[in-house]
Amino acid sequence: MIALVTGANRGLGRETARQLVAAGHTVLVGARSESAARETADALGGGAVPLRLDVTSTADIDHAAEEIERRFGHLDVLVNNAAIHYDTWQRAVSADLAVVREAAETNVLGPWHLTQALLPLLRRGSHQRIVNVSSEAGSLASMGGGTPAYSLTKAALNALTRMLASELRPEGILVNAVCPGWVATEMGGPGGRPVQDGAAGIVWAATLPDDGPSGGFFRDGKTHPW
Ligand code: NDP
């Protein structure tokens, strides 16, 4: 199986890539810096392949599609993991809308654009899964203040997950959103759960069987409230 993980040079993306490589899969290690992609792929070894990919860059997305086409001719799994979270303790009533725009570019339009660009390759895959790494912060059921740009963009990613799942289900492409829980990464900070545990839920969604769910929001393989 050929998988692409975005933001795979550190945190949950890197651990997701590591677990997929350990399971014997070929994993394109997406990172916005070419050197970070190379260093991570070298460290992971096995079937790890470096791929420069800033998800906000049209040129990088076009290049990624060309590279995957040239090297493999298809893609099985897309893990939209890369995201930013720059607005802790802001309030919607006074949020810096420039931060909201930047978060939307990275957290929603990036995965959306990348998914569109890679769909022709996914359609040629034999185990088609799209995993959108979301967050509890995007859950409308528990939505409050605190991180307006991040929460809004994760809620939008969840909505995108529903739309894509509905449109792609007839083609056998499963699309799900996953909340990894609070994880001890640079974004999550110390005190979170081990990165291995958070990534395991992403890998679960990336390796669902053909009769697995689509259009769901999951944490640790269990349904999470939208
Ligand atoms: P980190 O901040 O540790 O890592 C984020 C990764 O995304 C980095 O590799 C970063 O690259 C990359 N990235 C950021 N912007 C871009 C871009 N434009 N193009 C490509 N890559 C980019 O975050 P986590 O590992 O903690 O988070 C991973 C996912 O899990 C995110 O979607 C996050 O929202 C979600 N999540 C995390 C939680 C947590 O507690 N950690 C909780 C809930 C959800 P670079 O090194 O270049 O900055």
Image (spheres, rainbow, N blue to C red):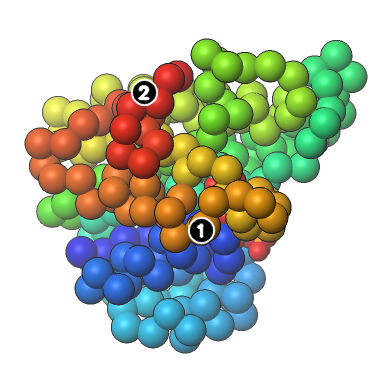
The residue pinned by badge 2 equals 162
Whichever of labels 2 and 1 marks the residue nearer the N terminus, that label is 2
Above or below residue 39? Residue 134 is: above
107 relative to 1 in the view: left or right: right
Give percent across and percent down for residue 83.
60, 47
Q: Are marks 2 and 1 in contact (CB under 8 Å)?
A: no
Select label 2 or label 1 by which is in front. Answer: 1
Q: Is mark 1 within 8 Å of ligand 1?
A: yes
Q: Quadrant of the C terminus?
A: top left
Image point (35%, 66%), residue name: 19
Give percent across and percent down for residue 156.
54, 25
Above or below residue 100? Residue 51 is: below
169 relative to 117 in the view: left or right: left
Q: Nearer the viewer, residue 70 or 128?
A: 128
**Quadrant of the rendered image containing residue 153:** top right
Q: Amino acid at mark 1?
A: Val
Give percent across and percent down for residue 53.
54, 62
Residue that extends furthest to the left in the rendered view of this protein: 211
The residue pinned by badge 1 equals 195
Could you classify mark 1 by the number of other residues whose Cα lies within 10 Å: few (under 14), some (14-19), or many (20 or more)?
many
Q: Quadrant of the N terminus?
A: bottom left
Q: Which mark is residue 81?
A: none
Residue that extends furthest to the right in the rendered view of this protein: 94
Q: Nearer the viewer, residue 50 or 14?
A: 14
Q: Is residue 197 visible?
A: yes
Image point (49%, 65%), residue name: 14
Give percent across and percent down for residue 106.
62, 43
Above or below residue 87? Residue 143 is: above
